[in-house]
Image (cartoon, rainbow, N blue to C red):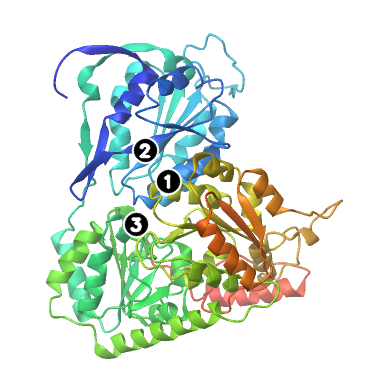
Amino acid sequence: MSGGGTVRLTMSQALLRYLMAQHIEVDGEERPYFAGVWAIFGHGNVAGMGEALHAVKDRLPTWRAHNEQGMAHAAIAYAKARFRTGAMVCSTSIGPGATNLVTAAALAHVNRLPVLLLPSDVFANRRPDPVLQQIEDFGDGTTSVTDCFRPVSRYFDRITRPEQIISALPRTMATFTDPAGCGPVTLALCQDVQAESYDYPLAFFEKRVWRIRRPEPDAAEFAGLADAIRGARRPLIVSGGGVLYARAAEALRALVAETGIPVVETHGGKGALSWRDPLNAGSIGVTGSTAANALAAEADVVIGLGTRLQDFTTGSRTVFAAPDRRLVQVNVQPFDAHKHGAVPVVGDAGIVIDRLSDALAGHRAPGDWTTRARDLADDWRAKVQAVMNATPTAPFQYADVVGAVDRAADADSIAVCAAGTLPAELHKLWRSERPGGYHMEYGYSCMGYEVAGGFGAKMADPSREVFVMVGDGSYLMLNSELATSVMMGYRIIVVLFDSEGYSCINRLQRSAGGADFNNMFRDSVQVVAPQFDYVAHARSLGALAEKAGDMAALEDALARARRADRSTVIVVDVDPYEETNLGGHWWDVVVPEVSDREAVRAARAAYEQQVAKQRIDG
């Protein structure tokens, strides 16, 4: 800090003034880091933070949402769509307003995404205790409901004095711009402290430009990686989200073209390499393509680029099956780089890819391996094309609808999803042309993310068409930000797949030998059979809406939605018992050891056979 003097401000005023002074440099361009503040006012933030937000509304916009979890999902989706180069802020009241953010905080934590959460807290001076909605611990007077945020925040602080933000806010920005430690920050703001004043140093509010560091790999670790690739007979790259966050998509494309090493994609890394690339074998793991999983089973050197090796990626540690395989993990986070007994290379994925292009100049993977990968990838693309262009029957198969959306989309379009049957369908079938075209929240796989997440992705880049694909279960859980998208003029296209219940989990239940129970509406306790009019519901929130009963109607509806002046919901009935019969892999879902039902006993025997294939090496 430089300069002298002070200015007397409330803590809330000072906090916002600091946020407005923070900028980020991306590819030589500076821009404000914070796009704005989501706020649902209640007691705790309406007076202190609310007054401060009103004073700066022309410089730092405040947006009104309908659900705290939903607004945080929109904020997180914005950060994801911006590849972690920008963030939003969420302000809530105390009590349920605060705890409604906890699920979203966990989502951001799992996905390593920046969002600043400002839940209000109890009075620091404790004079009016217990205040409305205050949680009281009979044995600890310092406990507050915001302690729930501690395990789901990368950095947590409770602000009990106005001057504490002088240290807390720089730590917030350091967390957001650390590629290895990025994640949600929670500053629990005691409601009396929000309105208290302090003489803040003027230097605290000077403009600051942050840059996301790109750590170089250790020389010995990198040399080991290059040697492993040179000696590999069947090398394979697993592209994870770290490739996108490192803005290394073009570098990856060039490396693949130079070396002939095939690539497979995690949910987080899908789109870094165009689906058209001849060496892109598609999705890997439980929701993987036949091509990717076949290559993974044979690969002798597996290079993870920016992936945390979630169980869906590794087939619960069975997909990389070659006895002689070596796993090398390139990651900015040492925690991830050491997983599964991997040889670690700690560093920025983009830097490592650039260095590999130099170190492997003139080197190519064995020709028979490259040819096999190309043939498998070509065969997979042909299968995807056939499935998505098949003549549909009533009701629709999931792939029929995904195919229609794919045809309605362009190269810049974004598909947004999070949970249920659709992540598997989209991971295998969605054809992403460029980075960001596949926006899947599959770290936390949070039902209810979809509509709000699509809205946030649209805010991040209004020029791109956003297609939200959501099941009826997720839609019923959290749909209120559809109204916010209409209110704020951010047009999204929501395709609602009506399967009459939790069809994905119902199929999982059946695969484990279980009976149909408590997932589909028809198998749940009910006095009156539910009759949902999703079209009328969406219209009541201000959106356009229609139901499509056949392919011609669906394609016409998608075309109208693209021309519309506001958000549209298109409802389609889908077969709840069928999914795309392509690709896939085993997933470790435990089956009871003891059951009176023969189907469960048979499933347990099959389960034990698969468990025996797991490779537990770290």
Could you give the CA–CA distance between mark 3 and mark 1, rounded to whole angstroms? 31 Å
CB under 8 Å between discs 1 and 2: yes
Q: Can you give x and y, in whole percent of width and height, for residue 247 in the image?
A: 27, 57
Tell me which label, 3 or 1, sits earlier in the chain.
3
Residue 337, compared with residue 197, is above or below; it is below
Q: Secondary structure at mark 3?
A: helix
Residue 79, compared with residue 314, is above or below; it is above
For the question of whether residue 412 can be seen, the reply is yes
Q: How many marks?
A: 3
Say which amino acid is labelled 1.
Met
Q: Nearer the viewer, residue 151 or 521?
A: 521
Say which amino acid is labelled 3.
Asp
Q: Is residue 610 left or right of residue 547?
A: left
Say which amino acid is labelled 2.
Ala
Q: Which quadrant of the view contains residue 561? A: bottom right
Residue drawn 31% across and 89% down? Answer: 371
Q: Is residue 226 left or right of residue 385?
A: left
Residue drawn 32% across and 28% down? Answer: 168
For the question of whether residue 592 can be seen, the reply is no
Could you give the CA–CA distance between mark 2 and mark 3, rounded to whole angstroms? 30 Å
Q: Can you give x and y, in whole percent of width and height, for residue 465 in the image?
A: 45, 57
Q: Nearer the viewer, residue 123 or 522?
A: 522
Q: Secondary structure at mark 1?
A: helix
Pointer 1: residues within 10 angstroms few (<14), some, or many (20+)? many
Q: Which residue is mark 3?
A: 336
Q: Is residue 79 left or right of residue 243?
A: right
Q: Which residue is mark 1?
A: 459
Tell me which label, 2 or 3, sits earlier in the chain.
2
Quadrant of the image containing the C terminus: bottom left
Q: Which residue is mark 2?
A: 35
CB under 8 Å between discs 3 and 1: no
Q: Secondary structure at mark 2?
A: strand
